[in-house]
Image (cartoon, coloured by chain):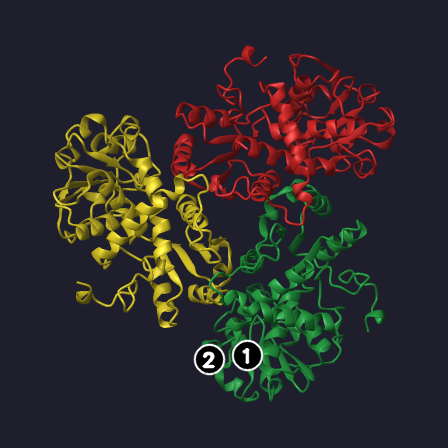
Chain colours: A yellow, B red, C green
Amino acid sequence: MRNSLPPNPQIDANGALTHLLSIDGLPREIVLNILDTASSFLEVSDRDVKKVPLLRGKSVFNLFFENSTRTRTTFEIAAKRLSADVINLDVARSSTSKGETLLDTIDNLVSMHADMFVVRHVSSGAPYLIADHLNRLGRSDIHVINAGDGRHAHPTQGLLDMFTIRHYKKDFSGLRIAIVGDILHSRVARSDIRALSALGATEIRLIGPKTLLPAEMDIAGTRVFNSLREGIRDCDVVIMLRLQSERMNGALLPSAREYFNCYGLTPEVLALASPDAIVMHPGPMNRGVEIDSEVADGPQAVILNQVTFGIAIRMAVMSLLAGN
Amino acid sequence: MRNSLPPNPQIDANGALTHLLSIDGLPREIVLNILDTASSFLEVSDRDVKKVPLLRGKSVFNLFFENSTRTRTTFEIAAKRLSADVINLDVARSSTSKGETLLDTIDNLVSMHADMFVVRHVSSGAPYLIADHLNRLGRSDIHVINAGDGRHAHPTQGLLDMFTIRHYKKDFSGLRIAIVGDILHSRVARSDIRALSALGATEIRLIGPKTLLPAEMDIAGTRVFNSLREGIRDCDVVIMLRLQSERMNGALLPSAREYFNCYGLTPEVLALASPDAIVMHPGPMNRGVEIDSEVADGPQAVILNQVTFGIAIRMAVMSLLAGN
Amino acid sequence: MRNSLPPNPQIDANGALTHLLSIDGLPREIVLNILDTASSFLEVSDRDVKKVPLLRGKSVFNLFFENSTRTRTTFEIAAKRLSADVINLDVARSSTSKGETLLDTIDNLVSMHADMFVVRHVSSGAPYLIADHLNRLGRSDIHVINAGDGRHAHPTQGLLDMFTIRHYKKDFSGLRIAIVGDILHSRVARSDIRALSALGATEIRLIGPKTLLPAEMDIAGTRVFNSLREGIRDCDVVIMLRLQSERMNGALLPSAREYFNCYGLTPEVLALASPDAIVMHPGPMNRGVEIDSEVADGPQAVILNQVTFGIAIRMAVMSLLAGN
């Protein structure tokens, strides 16, 4: 299977993971290896001393060109529990604003003996650019993790979603999965769709208003619904997306209240799904916009468990990249 | 004594400290235990290697919803000297500004296996809200420290003030203590008054202009003075409060110079107090506004010793909360 | 030699380094000791576990009164690789803006048992003020490193430049060194000129437009050129300075393009220097303003090696100050 892939900057010549850029193009066995490794890390965060020495003496740089305290925190915790030295670069205020190019910044940090870059960027492809640059320098010992690039990908979110689904549903075959909301602008949706396809989910349904769905019908293997009540029927997994407030202010949507009436997940609507359906959300939630508090805090929600699993996934990815 | 208290979110069923929210309602023996524990930590900061492993592998979150570099730094140092992993959350710029509720943020961090929250907030009661939420979740293993909430409380400041007084005066009985300045807006004053009452100080005098004193005479066991020269007479301890510049600009006060003339602590005024009186200030000082440099740098000032004791107090509180 | 120096706040009574404030007044043997110590630290950053315990349990404070993410990062990495606890103080937003004096802030951090201050300040002399204050307090156990003060000095940059030159050229005697660009506003240039003089470079040439050269001919032992093509001839080392964009916007220079035509380092101009000349730059580079990309990425550029050496220099300085 690996051989049939086009050249993939995140996989080295031996088929091992060198960067995590996107779930797209990630061989199924690597995805499964990450999930299995994360299982073994779940226990570390439950210990009295939540620390293992796997990245001791390594320098992990959080390069957040776009501010995201929550995502930065999850990577910082994961790296510190692996005993790495973590350096947070407030890149918005740094040399890049002094006119230095992105790759000059990277070259500098490489010269300081960086081991790993966790990159968040408004531009799709920025983490690829960095990984490609490192590959061309022959620096296979330095690793890039995409922590969200533009509308493109957010692979650790996709992986933690897969971890969550596997945790509760054991197997992907036979699963009907609904992704609800602003599919058009969501890197979470993109990452999830790719991962679900790779892992063999039976049916992926994309549910949302026409203005928030990809115009082209180019997402293979998915079914599109404009009605939540229709689309959610008999689903085993319901992934709610965050509605960015800028969408509400813009021309794409009438109002938060009207959105909630059509696409907000209430107990009544959830009752249309499979009785043991789980409800997921990448956070932060807009209660009363895309999700009703009764559902968010109800027995079918696994939203906070996703957060716990997310730390284990990030520890697993960092540990695997570092060669453990 | 403990049994006569109303239900107290900071004390568990066995009477042990689970959160530090306010000195109000803290049993005297717990206050004394914190002071005694701090004594034993004073020595750690004098070592060549200023580190003990008591919080190794614990995740301490500094949640500063209001910026205070100085206070944040003291908690960061204390936690690092206890070997904790410290994560500073710049909450003003994070998910809360994306519309997430305070308790959703807390739930997320709990799911990341937080062990301790150090909380600073403009709203009185925010740390209580968090502690109460954790108690209702049954998470007695996660602890909240109030690092200043609105005008309400700043208990580690109160405790370090008590530590300082005990250090220099040995006993609280028989002590006359003056608190001078903006009592009305000061959480330091509130915390001190409560602690001094609990520890049995003989007389607490509140000194300041009418506009900066609580309108109601509701602070039991205190005497109020509008004249510094009268109020300071024969006092053993003089606690000067910082005058916030916003008070000076507002209608509450005529000018900084006039304030200094009436309430600034000069050597001449200090001479009216007991000859071995100590002078305290929570910092940062406004030299020439509430205190004369000759006093601030003079032999009776113990202002910098308060800072040293403050690290020991914060280490003691964190260590006790963590069950050591 | 030491005895002939005026009283020097960075050298103690035994001639040992207590602060690093400026290369000016630093005895030659101390400069050489720092370079030799840095050589031994180069290897640490190449290890699998990039950490030595020399500063374990020490508290290093990054006091950046002026924002410089890049410089702050190099000190943070150096201190963490020495196992220190690093506390970054965002001083612009802290107590100093609440009207506290610089020395009151320092006194507070001293009371928290700080071991080392890394200070960046817009005002020339601020690190001296702090060092002098500590010396007067008799606190020879607390050390100040100047990380750039106004237009005055940036000694670790000067030292890493000397390390770089020695690494490639072995000996300073017989060397012709060109410093090109905005000499007038550059603390890098000042630090380099002093270090080169101390180490016995044969000829130092200052090259730039009249508006960016010191008006007074007070920099002893240097030759001034307004033509890059003339000045660079037969040089062994070419140090390019960053052109601050505020110069370009101001009245001092016509335009970036015109500057590049006259003072930009292109392959053609570099060919006038010695064939084995090395090209240095303190970063961040303005490609196409002071340096052509072909030169910046070419075989004679040692710009990224400077960055690597800079970490070793900072580790060496911290380690020597701490008494190792």
Look at the image and tell me in which quarter the N terminus of chain A lies. bottom left
Query: Which mark is drawn over residue C298?
Result: 2
The residue under the point 51% across, 69% down is C285
Determine if residue B97 is in view: yes
Q: Chain of mark 2?
A: C
Q: Amino acid at mark 2?
A: Gly
Judge left or right: residue A62 versus residue B78: left
Residue that badge 1 annotates: C279
Image position of B247 with respect to C246: above or below: above
Secondary element under disc 1, as helix, strand or loop, is strand
Image position of B129 with respect to A53: above or below: above
Do the residues under discs 2 and 1 have CB atoms within 8 angstroms? yes
Q: Amino acid at mark 1?
A: Val
Q: Nearer the viewer, residue B232 or C305?
A: C305
Quadrant for residue B244, please give it. top right
Q: Nearer the viewer, residue A142 or C175?
A: A142
